[in-house]
Each structure stands twice: as C-alpha cells, then as structure tokens.
Amino acid sequence: MPEVLTAPLVVEFPFTRSLGPVQSAFLTGLRERTVLGVTASDGRVVVPPTEYDPVTAEELRELVEVGSAGTVTTWAWNRSPRRGQPLATPFAWVLVRLDGADTALLHALDAPGPDTVRTGMRVRIRWAAQRTGAITDIACFEPDDGPIGDAEPAPHTGEFADPVTGITAPARLDYTYAPGRAQSRYLRALADHKTIGERCPSCRKVYVPPRGACPTCGVATDTQVEVGPRGTVTTFCIVNIKAKNLDIEVPYVYAHIALDGADLALHARIGGIPYDRVRMGLRVEPVWTEDGRFPDHYRPTGEPDADYDSYKELI
C-alpha cells in the first residue's frame, strides 16, 4: 500500500478592527481594572456589553460598572491547553456572572483540578500585570472565598483618558492535511518531475491538479494524463506584501498557468524574469530545486507568446 501523505498546515493572519463607543469603553475599562456592562431595554445588565440589544436590536449606550467577583454558572475542564490560550497549565473554561450583571462572561479559571470546580462557586478576576486594553487584561479568574455580592451596578460615563479605539487579534488555525487518492498520485508524480492530470470520461477535459471527479459532469476521473511540462500564463498578479516565513523578496509574480494538454489552469510563482515583464500569453516551464518535490517556480521558455485564442477559455 502506498504511503499515506500528510502535511501540517497553518493558516494565520492578524484580524484588525475598530471599536465603537461601547466596546472602546469596555476594553479601556479593563485596562483600568474596571468592568463595564450595558443596560438592555428590559433592564438587564449585559456583560460583556453589546452595542445592540440582543432581543430588540435597539442601540444600547447606558454603561454601568459591575463587580470584579462573580459566580460560576457553568464550566468545562481543559486538560490540554493549546497555544495562545490564557494559561499554560490545565484549567477550566468558565462562564462567570459578575456581581451586578445578568449575563455571564467567558474566561479561564485557574484551579488545581476539575474536582475543585463547581457551578455556583465564587471567583474573582486576576488582573494581568501589564494591561493594554484587551480581554487578556483579565489574566484569568481565581477562586474567591468572599460572599455573594449584592452591590447594584453603578452608572458610568465610559470616559477614560487615552481610550482604546482599535484592536488587532491574531487568528490561527493549525491542522493536518491528507490528500485523497487523486492528489496523492499528483504529488508523487511531481516528485519525479512529472505533472499528471485526470481526464473526465464524459466531457474529456483534463483537470490539473486532479480532483478525483469532474466538477462539471460529476463523474469519476480515473484516467491519468501527463501534461506540460510547459504552459502559458493566462492571468497574474504582482505581490507587494512579504508573507511571514516565506523567503521570497517582493515584488514577485503569482500566475495562473495553463499547462499544455490541461483544461484547468494551476497557480505558481513566476521567476527568471523582471516582475514588470510578465504578461498574459508568456510561455513558461517549471524549475525544480535540488531534491525538490515540486516546482519551485516557472520561468520563461523563450518561445513566442501564445495566441490569446489558445488560452482565452482558461482565464
């Protein structure tokens, strides 16, 4: 049986957003060790505060200050913390209804074990030593032996010096990719400096990379066809932003390339030519690095440009 191909993949990007007056006040308040909620149209205090009523969608602006201690309403034990989570040791995810609030806030509870956590237990905020105006200004919750608070939420203007107006939150997804039979054959062929596609038995189109089925006819494509290695640039873009962990100097060109004999263009980097000389119709060929399992880039072949009519259906 052939080796099952797998590869670790990471999708990561910074998510940047601006804050309205409610979220700005909430996050700036955390920086100042103050927890703010908002009064909903039915009189409930919502924490974290929302800009619109969750029931009526009415705009909300009446901010109030609530306590820094509260009661656990529900919880789940996290025995294997992941990268970027609040604590590096096992902890509980908890929903905490802070004193004066009517809704619960999700955060981490630092507890020695699941047998020490229960619904109804009292907890308090452990503030981060360095606070910047983010939910991470609450380092976590910790058990609290104090009594249930009966303080009423106090009105608050939401005004602070140097308010936080925007945040950047990292988004990251780690996963393991396992290609199917069709793509595994394609990847193994690339390691031998060959490019194979699969032909649909109905419409006769050759798809590269193969998908195992024709996206148009919906039938299996089990006939392998070697294509290329040369091809034609159909469309392209100039990349001016350097990607993290990618050792390629900008600007560079990424293009759709219709390999000879294929009915679907694949995408790859263009090299061996100044970025401002890449054009539609440019004839290119693959370049492999030593021991490379796939082409590093495509370079010009020196042939005359392909006629537009020869590739217009693949744009």
Image (cartoon, grey):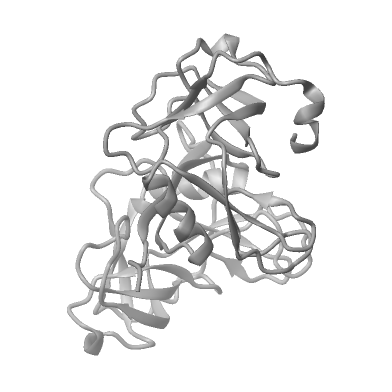
Residue located at (70% from left, 67% from top): 54
Which image quadrant for residue 220? Answer: bottom right
Asked whether 251 or 155 is in front, the reply is: 251
Q: How many marks?
A: 0
The percent coordinates of residue 201 (x first, y second) are 73, 63
Report the residue at 79% width, 57% height from top: 203
Quadrant location, the C terminus: top right
Whether residue 67 is situated above or below residue 286 in the rendered picture:
below
Residue at horizontal 64 percent and vertical 27 percent from the top: 232
Q: Where is residue 305 in the image (x, y as percent from the top left)?
A: 68, 16
Residue 290 location (% of width, % of height): 27, 33
Q: Nearer the viewer, residue 269 or 86?
A: 269
Q: Can you see residue 157?
A: no
Relative placement, left or right, of 192 versus 27 is left
**Apparent side of residue 181 relative to residue 313 in the rendered image (left or right):** left
Instruction: Give the residue displayed 25% in from the left and 85% down from the top.
Output: 114
Q: In the rendered image, is residue 88 in sight? A: yes
Q: Is residue 310 above or below residue 156?
A: above
Above or below, 187 relative to 120: above
Q: Nearer the viewer, residue 196 or 266?
A: 196
Quadrant of the snapshot with the N terminus = bottom left
- Residue 144 horizontal side relative to residue 250, left or right: left
Q: Position of residue 119 (x, y in %)?
A: 38, 88
